[in-house]
Amino acid sequence: MAKGRLIEDKPRKRKPSHRAEENKPTENLVKSPAPQKLASEPKFSPMEKSRMRRPHRRQHSKFSLDFGKDFPKKFATGVLVVILLGVLLYFVIQRYNLLRRQRQVYSPIQLPRLVQPNETAPENSPELFWGTYRPGVYFGVSHRSPHSMLFGLAWATLGTLSPQFRHECLQDDGLKSYGWVEHDGRNFGVETILDGNHNITVSFVKRSAGPYGGDWTARISVSAAPKSVKPRPIAFLFYAYLPDSTRGMLQSFAHGNELKRLRGFTHELGAFQVNFHTSSSDGPGGGGKTLHQSHLSGYCPREDALLPSILSALAFKSHDSTLIYLMEKQRFDTAFNPPSQPNLWVAEVTVQPAEVGPADSPHPPPSMTALEVEFVSQASTSSDAVPLIGSHFDEQLANFSAAFQAKFNSRFPVYGLRRSEAELALSRSALSNLLGGIGYFYGSSMIQSPLLGPDPLDYGPSSLYTATPSRQQFPRGFLWDEGFHGLLLAQWDVEMALQSLSHWLDLMNAEGWIPREQILGWEARSRVPAEFVVQSTSVANPPTLMLVVEALLQRLPTMSAADSELFAKWATNAFPRLHSWFVWFNTTQVGSLPTTYRWRGRPSNNPFQLNP
């Protein structure tokens, strides 16, 4: 295009509109007046318009380095703010981690529990519901529940003005011997106690049936000890205790001074009754006679105060007699002002065992049954139910004893070695004392951690089904000992071994630590000095529970189908907890060399002290 050539502005053609209004006649439209030009408006020709210069705008750079005079001050302020925010964030993170670790100390690990809430209920495990689960007393019965009803036995040899009562297994009692002769952990047990000139036998038989755990009977028999002088009278006190936390009710029925039965109800036991059967005359074969009976109903605040509460209601029969009796409920309540509703019932029976026969007599001293206590659940109260007493008790006891001996011979064979009957009886007694020493505990542990300061905290509450190393010294659970107990349990009863392992692994906290000593409940805590109650989270026991797992794996090919299925299910659920336990050992107890561990707290300058 040549320079200076003008382009004519041609008017644009307007597109025809399709609106309906354009089809109307044009005469109806009103024309708007054209805008008038101002007289003062300058006139420019098209050539002049094209040659006019437009002013150029000054463009500034986006990356100008001109920060101004306040830049150093602003920069320093920004850096300081960033540093302060970083320091604040650091302390916030550290505080959060500390609080998280503190919560891990007293919080259970967030993994599925191995013992389900209703797994110990009677409908799921009837044979293990009731048992001699109070190993700290010479004879005690309870059920596997956090709020169990308690039964127990106490006795004293009379003849002095200060009789000594036996209840808890204490070294100061001076008994010649006591222990379980036979006990299968499920159905029955026979315990013998040699106290001075008295040979006491306590037999326990269960009938596990029905939705509430079935029935059981405890028989207390006594005879003169062989080659002893004339035995003195002996008083037996059998009690039933309903803790306040059980939230049940119980009513007593007596005939004169003799307590006949208790009838009650709890949520777990349903309706039940407890029958007391005493010997009113000489026993079979002239085994002895009953001298006196009495009973009381009163209140006891806690289970560790059972014997003091009972002894506070005792009195001598007369000023010139050494026989004792239990005061009436009115006198007992007036003296100690307990709540109006009693929770403790005691039956007292005083007997005189028969004298020992001639020294050359081939027969043992005759025995008499002083008392039979029969617990009958709701499912067995029909008229056609056979009471578990007398000859029927003897029959059931004989059947369970024969089955126990047969199972013992099959699980612990001698492989052709000759063993005398005394040696076999000793072996059966060793196993029976392990099974009879199994207890069920519920409560909170006292723990202490460097992360929480010097004050101990409660950890729990938790339940524990475990064997105990010593009914006399340590009637509670110990983590290290349970690994060795489990080796026998795994060979005797797979389900009982897995139940014990499950309860122990459920005690694990969020860090993977398991308290090494379990002092759960008032009854267990009363036996431990205060300085040993608190457990430190930095103290560990060797993981001997893995020995039980290894033993079960080795026995897996010879297990029954039911036991194999039970173990496979348990192993699947237990593996995450076992892994967490392994990680805790590898982070807190690791030694200086690879794959080694160090015993914390052992003095390095004394190689001869194994267990400080």
Image (spheres, rainbow, N blue to C red):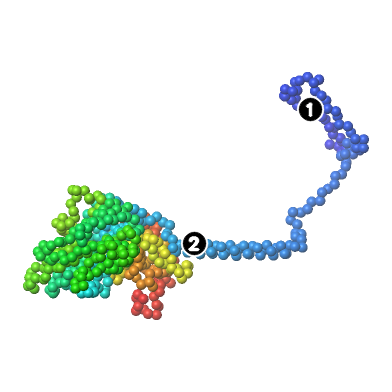
Q: CA distance from mark 1 to mark 2?
A: 80 Å
The quarter holding residue 310 reads: bottom left
Image position, residue 101 (x, y; %): 48, 63
Rendered residue at 22%/50% (across/down)? 381
Q: Nearer the viewer, residue 230 or 196?
A: 230
533 with respect to 258 (left or right): right
Instruction: Judge from the rendering whether residue 524 lies leftward or rightward of residue 72; answer left or right.
Output: left
Task: Tell me the element at label 2.
Answer: helix
389 or 21, nearer to the observer: 389
Query: At 15% across and 57% down in the image, what residue appears?
Result: 390
The disc at residue 169 is none
**For the image shown, how many numbered marks are present on the structure?**
2
User: Residue at the spot x=34%, y=53% of the render?
Assistant: 118
Check disc 1 and report its element: helix, strand or loop: loop
The answer to whether one can see residue 467 in this image is: no
State left or right for residue 200 relative to residue 341.
left
Crowding around mark 2 (Cα neighbors within 10 Å: few <14, some 14 to 19, many 20+) is: few
Q: Dividing the picture into quarters, in which one does residue 178 lie?
A: bottom left
Position of residue 257 measured from the top left corner of the image (x, y, whole percent): 21, 61
Q: Are marks 1 and 2 in contact (CB under 8 Å)?
A: no
The residue tagged 1 is: 13
* Disc number lying in front (1 or 2): 2
x 72%, y 22%: residue: 20
Of the image marks 1 and 2, the number of the one nearer the N terminus: 1
Q: Which residue is mark 2?
A: 100
Amino acid type for the residue under numbered disc 1: Lys
Residue 89 spot, x, y in % from top left: 58, 62
Q: Which residue type does callout 2 highlight? A: Arg
